[in-house]
């Protein structure tokens, strides 16, 4: 029997009265009702109407990321409320739902002892651009009620203090809150970018879904046609980014960036660490790209970094590509390509035999020439230094090799 038939008559009457002017709102009762990136509002309803939400920093707090949500005024309909309350987006990231405050563009989480020791703050809300498990939003059954959970706590309303709180499931003194999706608050538009497809003429504002592979534990090249705030939030909390800071006749130096620094558009970076699973979602992106600008060149003295937005053939050239722990020259890799959202480097003729290494926050990556080695048959396998390793019959360990004049990767 459908659940609606099981509801009491009194509830049906209240629903009819409450929603007469609110056809643009859907009450959320389970995670199955959530729509990624749509707009939502949270409210508490009593005899006065629907209470709005305003936020402010908790007084006397030394942690400015701890905020209070207060109810200032009740409105007769949800349509009226929508114009006078905080709106949220609920986003699904790495399999978890997150609540994004659209007024400060930060995620909403719970305060616990890892944030501050004083328990009086544990009722309030943490705001951050780097969400972890304290920020996961779930909707769970608690007896007959549908509880909106942030981290491990329930969101409730303190009708005496006129404020929203986070409390344990066992709390029975505070009132339930309600979550509504705004039907005409359409999900933010999303543009999918793929490392196997080139970027054409694009003028776009909205969210981006980036399909790009990275190798955990190694340095990876990265260039994007838009800025990224707080890149650890996008690519993983255990990742680090590096930007070129200097170059000499013998070395190229990269510095480690802080977690709060922004990745600039059309700028080559290195990134390493442990990556979350793609696709990577970047919100509120601005892209203004012309297909003719498929390569972005950054000159640093004798070195030039070439950011790629369309597949670039570099086989047989003096381009250097990054693979794991070294840059390799492509002179003898006749079919080598660089995929979009990566970069390669070139060295001026006067310095190409002098540049020896990249220094990345003290870590050293060698720059090696791939020696001229031409296999005499199509089955022999050579290493990147031109040494014959196999006739193609013996198994080889994982790595990058040359076979029939082409680079192959054995995993």
Image: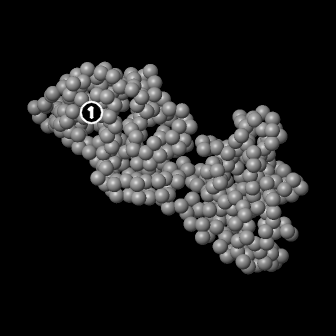
Q: Is residue 18 above or below residue 346?
A: below
Identified at 43% across, 33% down, the residue is 243
Q: Is residue 328 visible?
A: no
Q: Position of residue 324 (x, y in %)?
A: 36, 31
Q: Is residue 251 visible?
A: yes
Identified at 83% across, 76% down, the residue is 10
Is residue 157 found left or right of 25 in the rendered image? right
Is residue 269 found left or right of 116 in the rendered image? left
Residue marked by disc 1? 346
Q: Position of residue 44 (x, y in %)?
A: 79, 62
SS under mark 1: strand
Q: Nearer the viewer, residue 242 or 396?
A: 242
Q: Is residue 53 above or below residue 351?
A: below
Quarter of the image with the N terminus in it: bottom right
Q: Nearer the viewer, residue 278 or 249?
A: 249
Q: Position of residue 286 (x, y in %)?
A: 47, 53
Query: What colour-coding does the image apply?
Result: one colour
Residue 352 found in image quarter: top left
Q: Nearer the viewer, residue 116 or 13?
A: 116
Identified at 30% across, 25% down, the residue is 367
Q: Is residue 341 above or below residue 72?
A: above
> Crowding at label 1, few (<14), some or many (≥20) Cα neighbours within 10 Å?
some
Q: Position of residue 87 (x, y in %)?
A: 67, 60
Q: Count numbered badges in the picture.
A: 1
Identified at 84% across, 50% down, the residue is 171
Quarter of the image with the C terminus in it: top left
């Amino acid at each position: 029997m459908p659940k609606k038939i099981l509801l009491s008559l009194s509830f049906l009457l209240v629903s009819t009265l409450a929603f007469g002017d609110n056809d643009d709102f859907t009450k959320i009762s389970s995670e199955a009702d959530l729509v990624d990136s749509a707009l939502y509002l949270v409210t508490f309803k009593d005899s006065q109407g629907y209470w709005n939400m305003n936020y402010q920093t908790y007084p006397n707090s030394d942690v400015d990321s701890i905020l209070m949500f207060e109810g200032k005024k009740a409105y007769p309909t949800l349509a009226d409320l929508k114009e006078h309350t905080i709106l949220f987006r609920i986003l699904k990231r790495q399999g978890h739902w997150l609540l994004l405050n659209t007024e400060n563009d930060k995620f909403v989480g719970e305060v616990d002892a890892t944030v501050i020791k004083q328990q009086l703050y544990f009722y309030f809300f943490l705001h951050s651009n780097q969400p972890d498990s304290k920020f996961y939003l779930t909707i769970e059954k608690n007896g007959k009620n549908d509880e909106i959970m942030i981290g491990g706590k329930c969101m409730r309303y303190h009708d005496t203090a006129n404020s929203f709180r986070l409390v344990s499931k066992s709390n029975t003194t505070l009132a339930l809150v309600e979550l509504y999706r705004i039907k005409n608050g359409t999900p933010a538009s999303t543009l999918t970018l793929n490392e196997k497809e080139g970027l054409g003429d694009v003028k776009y504002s909205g969210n981006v879904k980036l399909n790009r592979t990275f190798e955990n534990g190694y340095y990876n090249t990265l260039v994007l046609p838009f800025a990224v705030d707080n890149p650890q939030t996008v690519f993983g909390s255990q990742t680090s980014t590096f930007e070129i800071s200097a170059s000499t006749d013998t070395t190229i130096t990269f510095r480690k960036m802080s977690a709060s620094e922004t990745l600039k558009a059309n700028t080559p970076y290195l990134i390493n660490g442990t990556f979350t699973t793609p696709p990577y979602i970047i919100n509120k992106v601005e892209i203004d790209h012309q297909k003719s600008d498929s390569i972005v060149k950054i000159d640093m003295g004798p070195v030039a970094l070439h950011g790629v937005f369309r597949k670039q053939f570099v086989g047989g050239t003096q381009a250097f590509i990054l693979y794991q722990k070294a840059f390799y020259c492509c002179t003898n890799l006749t079919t080598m390509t660089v995929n979009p959202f990566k970069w390669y480097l070139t060295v001026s003729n006067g310095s190409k035999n002098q540049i020896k290494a990249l220094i990345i926050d003290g870590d050293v990556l060698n720059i090696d020439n791939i020696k001229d080695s031409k296999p005499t048959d199509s089955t022999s396998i050579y290493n990147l230094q031109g040494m014959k390793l196999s006739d193609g019959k013996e198994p080889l360990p994982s790595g990058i090799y040359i076979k029939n004049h082409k680079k192959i990767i054995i995993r």
